[in-house]
Image (cartoon, coloured by chain):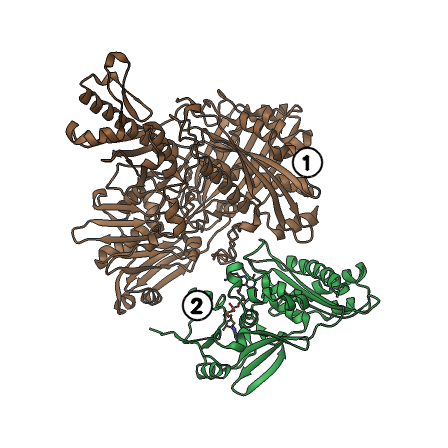
Amino acid sequence: MSQLRYEAPGSVDEAVALLASDSDAKVLAGGTDLIVQMRSGLRKLGLVVDVKKIDELMSVSSDGGAWTIGAAVSGAEMNENAALKKDWPGVVEAVDLIGSTQVQGRASAGGNLCNASPAADSVPAMVAAGATAVIAGPNGRREVPVEQVPVSPGKTSLATGEMVVAIKMPAKPARNGEAYLRMIPRTEMDIAIVGAGVSLTLDDGGTCTAAKVALGAVAPTVVIVDDAAKALIGTKVDDAALEKMAAACSAACKPIDDKRGTIEYRTKVAGVMARRAALIALERARSN
Amino acid sequence: MPNESSFKWVGTRQIRPDGPDKVTGRAKYAADYTMPGMLIGRILRSPHAHARIKSIDTSKAEALAGVKAVVTSADFPELASEMSPNSEMVIDFSDVSNNVMARKKVMYDGHAVAAVAATDAEIAEEALSLIDVVYEVLPHVIDVEEAMAEDAPLLHDGMITEGITPTPTKPSNIAKRVEFRSGDVDKGFAEADVIVERTYKTAAVHQGYIEPHAVLASAAEDGQVQVWVSTQGQFMVRAFCAKVCGLAISQLRVTPAEIGGGFGGKTVVYGEPVAVQLSRKSGKPVRVVMSREEVLRASGPTSGGVVETKVGAKKDGTLVAVDAVLKYQAGAYAGSPIGPGCMCMTAPYEIENVQLIGYDVVSNRPKVAAYRAPGAPISAYAFESALDEVARELNMDPIAIRQKNAVKEGSKTVYGVTFPRIGFEEVLEAAKNSDHFKSPVPEGEGRGLACGFWFNIGGESSAACHLNEDGTVTVISGNPDIGGSRASIALMVAETLGIDYNKVRPIVADTSSIGYNFVTGGSRVTFATGMAAINAAEDVIGQARERAAKIWEIDVDAVTWEDGEARPAGSNAGDHDPMSLADIAKMAPKTGGPINGHGSINAQGAGAGFGCHICDLKVDEGTGHVTVTRYTSIQDVGRAIHPGYVDGQLQGGAAQGIGWAINEEYVYNDDGLLQNAGFLDYRIPVASDLPMIDTVLVEVPNDRHPYGVRGVGEVPIVPPMAAVANAMESATGVRMTSLPMSPPKVLKALEGS
Ligand SMILES: Cc1cc2nc3c(=O)[nH]c(=O)nc-3n(C[C@H](O)[C@H](O)[C@H](O)COP(=O)(O)OP(=O)(O)OC[C@H]3O[C@@H](n4cnc5c(N)ncnc54)[C@H](O)[C@@H]3O)c2cc1C
């Protein structure tokens, strides 16, 4: 009979050493994905490395406006951080959408990213906002844009022994606004059929100078829609621009037909969600 | 009937006897039971929708250390066909046996094929993986209309449709045809000024009880078997386990645990006989607890159905004809609620010409089980939707058209019953006067209204009322309490005896501690078992009067019972101080011994119930997402013994109905495998999906019950689907004729409009 080993190291180095020692090892953050998967028999593991005893993974700090969010910090804690929420409301709201009050007490942005679900709520928001992931491994540390972490459903680009230590958010640009919205059939406790994160920056005249649009649940991994961003840049984010952006989003979808939604539905609603998120982002940019 | 205003306990909101234990976590559910040496049972389930079992090799599993028993259908006696009443439906014991453990063929994804008992769950799981089943996969059919087709894959080689003359010679998947008829529909439609003709479809939906099925069975060397179980009927479990396991009823003692929901789904057995056989084979107690996935794959949903509906009305709103064909999924074995579906479809209305033809159809899905008002929600969705369209065409108010045709005392139903005093007219009047109906429809929203009917049942019940030494009372009955029935029974007993509610302690007994009770189903418990308990309390009063008569040395007829006391009846009876129950209890050893009352009845005269629901909602035109913003459930509840728990029934039924309307469905892939066997993708509503559901309790007492009780638990799931669909049309102009009204379907319908 297989025996499950549980370790809760106090440092990143120890965690990395443990992870490197067993190719079947997994990081345990909040466990709201991992434990569910283990209990339903989807995952059989030899070693679980609980990272919640490592300070670096459990703290939030800001330095010159840039944020470092420990990979295992819970959604509830992010949501209670008023300064973080003021700078990056879209990202915090996206994390806050995960599960329910109970789930929020555990679920982390790092876990959401590394679970590599195409429908992960925080990922399109983090991508749109330009977040990066700090990765530690046997060969030291590296930093990559978050979109480079998930590579296909359930798979990440992390090598054996590697783990995400923190999510970094850049200093908030002036007159930038971002937002994330998702479509679910219920009002909570559900999985996104489509998610859309939009970040945009305006100049003093209200013209869009930079934009990033990312979609979730419409392809095997998060989709960055450059054409959608282009549709906004150089405009006042008026109806025509939004229309063009929504069309670009729909065109960029490569969804599947499954129990959660049809290709037709996902494609259509991607544009609707992106448009609505863009309007919120616009409102925020104007008041920043 | 006692004078209403004189009630002291009936109609008050007391704390339920089971409440404190439930909110503090002390309540013991079936999965909480353990015994020394207990084994864990696990069930191997079919990975195919339809397949012949060529062979099952259990030798590797048996050889695994820690495995104490393995069973397959070879360990269960093969049963001949024998019909048995089951909740409001009937069931064939031979099908029950084959459903519990597949014999020769598996009929649906998740059908049990073997089971193991081992010293722990991990070993049991591993043992399952060591069982080698060789299948020959057969073509399958999921959809009810495809299953009816001439060339459909056959589930049962010997299934000859009942109810057709001459008897068909070829087998099919149509188990039964039923017909209900009154008047002449052709004549009726000829008189109609407006005719609406449409086909409505509903999806199979699960009862969604939060507690999965769980059972602990312990078989002793002398052949006696004890069972602790989550069920709506310990006597049903006893009877079914006896049949399926080949035991005498006296060999089984079944104790119902506290139950975490049933809604009809726990009126049959699944793992119970399996646990019994595993325990008999291993000689150890065995616990079998289903996972949520097993619950959804293998326990009973209710039917999905197709209802072809044609309704004709005159200009003044008089309904003149209804012609409908109803096709209900039975699951893999015969026995959908097609009969009740037909009976309830038009029951709220006096319609001269009605023809309803129903088909009970098997397909490769789990066998359906009862679910609140089984069958009625499907046909009511069709009829109440069509009626809404008729009203729209006639430009008539939805309540006015219903009032115009409403049944009343003396109206005759299409199934032959003439209504006694009923409360449908009062319900419609209350709906019309409700704050909800009178307030304007909010901007951007739509409002819909629909009604529903359920006949409710009585049946066999036993209860005992024990007078304790200090004058308190224990009430023992035999129906698992799924809706607050202990509280209601205690209230009625307190009222009858004239003592404080808190002096009455009700319990639900095991099968050896009280006489037979039919299942908790058909909204019958407060009515029928309540009546048995009232009879038992009256028996106590009779005995108490005799004891007082003995002490006072007067005739028993000279002793009356008032306000919880024996009193001399008038001055002729002599001058004696009244004796309370406590006084009489104290004297009992000297006056003849313990005082215990009994009630055993087959209750007749269950009062039919009617409801009217009003729904406001808004639709997100970009996504098709529906938000119910306001909802009111109005119902004739006979008399609300405990109004709080009656409110709870009306709200719970509405909540489940709204889920049925908007999101719930079984999703199958092309191989006939269920894709959404979990609450993440089988979407019952979460709390934030619903507004507060308002209730209006209309009380038209049932004169066949001492306190006027009518069943209340089932009616409230009948109207919601049409209420939501009618509100959808009001909000968007789009008529949804297929459930669920999920966002993708709504968006598509909006675009097509
Ligand atoms: C009831 C319920 C509702 C949910 N609702 C939502 C929802 O609305 N939206 C949504 O997106 N998700 C939802 N989820 C999924 C889950 O809660 C989220 O994905 C959550 O963010 C996971 O975080 P966690 O800390 O619990 O991760 P864990 O379960 O601990 O880990 C998830 C995966 O990531 C790996 N991992 C975790 N941290 C690291 C790290 N630092 N480095 C490397 N690998 C790591 C783990 O090994 C594992 O494979 C829900 C889950 C439940 C149970």
Q: Are marks 2 and 1 in contact (CB under 8 Å)?
A: no
Q: Which chain is green?
A: A
Q: Are marks 2 and 1 on the same chain?
A: no
In the figure, residue B168 lies in which quadrant? Answer: top left
Crowd class of label 1 (few under 14; some 14 to 19; many from 20; radius 10 Å): few
Tell me which residue sits at (59%, 23%) in the image. B187
- Of the pair B720 and B546, the residue shown nearer to us: B546
Question: Residue A225, how many percent across, how many down?
Answer: 70, 69
Of the residues shown, which amino acid type is indicated by label 2?
Met
- Residue that label 1 marks: B440
Q: Secondary structure at mark 2?
A: helix
Specify the subunit that label 1 lies on.
B
Using the image, tell me which numbered label, if any, was put on residue A201.
Answer: none
Crowd class of label 2 (few under 14; some 14 to 19; many from 20; radius 10 Å): few
Question: Residue B411, how many percent across, how many down?
Answer: 50, 22
Question: Residue B654, how many percent across, how many down?
Answer: 52, 41
Q: Which chain is brown?
A: B
- Of the pair A103 and B387, the residue shown nearer to us: A103
Q: CA separation, marks 2 and 1?
A: 52 Å
- Residue that label 2 marks: A38
